[in-house]
Structures are given as structure tokens and as C-alpha cells.
Amino acid sequence: MNMLTHLAFGLLAALVFLPEVSGAYVVIFVLVALLGALLPDVDHPNSFINERLGFTKVFSWLFSHRGLLHGLFGVLLFGGIAVYFNNFVAKALVVGYVSHLFGDALTNEGLHPIPFVDFGVHGPVRTGSFSEKIVFLFICAIILFVLYKAL
């Protein structure tokens, strides 16, 4: 999936968990979830995050794209690092991270969620295709509906 589609999935996932968040923390939760929605692609040298934060490119040298970081290992690694700082931040990061994995599972490239197990999840959507644009628009429509119902 492309960056905008991952951000849409991340926003939708954050909105699902917002009833558990109160006050000024809503904005922080959403922003961290959006970061989490982009984070798995630090294993791609030309990802949005790696283009902005040069130090994260080390992950693209250590891990192949859609390898270990695109599954349970990545969730535990980054979620564990975030828990060290704050449980709230960790929850938001994991919500966004898992939304990214869900989006990639819809693509025909798919992902292997459990390390070292020959099990992959693949969907019908080709990254960057018309079908991805349809998925993006569908997710945006759901986001608008959720926001409308919340008002």
C-alpha cells in the first residue's frame, strides 16, 4: 500500500480506539497512531520515514522489505521500545502499526506475520493500482462516517 492508504488505515484504527482516550490526549493518540501506520516501512530504503529521518535507514540495511518488521516481531520490537517510554504511546503506536500490517495483508505482495513460519497472508489489491485507490476512498468514507456519528 502507498503512504496515504496506510495513513487512512491508521486514522481509522485510531478513531476506533478513541473512546478509550480522553481530553488533550486525543491528538497525541492520533498522531502517534499515524506514525505507527508508517513505521513498518522503515525496512524500505525509500519510505516516507526514511526520506525524512535519515537515521532510520539502518533498518532498511538490517531488514528486507516486508520481512521481520512486517509482522509480530516488528509489533513487539517497536511496541516494546514505546512501552519503555509510556504505555499510552505504546498503545497508540501498536494500533497504527497493526493497521499498516492489515493494509499490507490486503495486497497481492502480502506479508508473513509470524517470523520463521511458512505462512503468508495475501490479498487481491496491487500496490498503487486502481483497486488501491478504491480501498483508499472506501476507508476515507468510513472515516467520515465515524466522525459524523461522533458529532
Image: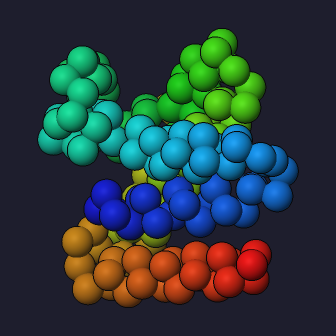
The relative height of residue 144 versus residue 31 in the rendered view (above or below) is below
Front in this rendered view, residue 11 or 131: 11
Whether residue 51 is visible, yes or no, is yes
Q: Is 46 positioned to the left or the right of 6 in the image?
A: left
Q: Where is residue 42 in the image (x, y as percent from the top left)?
A: 32, 34
Could you tell me residue 137's position as x and y percent? Answer: 42, 84
Between residues 20 and 50, which one lies in front from this camera angle?
20
Residue under the point 17% across and 36% down: 51
Which quarter of the image is occupied by the N terminus? bottom left
**How is the protein colored in the picture?**
rainbow
Seen at 68% across and 78% down, the residue is 146
In this rendering, does residue 113 appear at all? no
State how many labels appear.
0
In the rendered image, the vertical position of residue 95 relative to residue 59, given as above or below: below
Location of residue 148 by image quarter = bottom right
Identify the residue at horizontal 63%, vertical 60% (top origin).
Answer: 13
Examine the rendered structure and indicate whether residue 109 appears above or below residue 141: above
Indicate the quadrant where residue 151 lies: bottom right
Image location (x, y in percent) of residue 30: 58, 50
Furthest residue toward top: 84
- Residue at 81%, 47% (x, y): give it: 22
103 w.r.t. 74: above or below: below
x, y (%) of residue 44? 24, 39
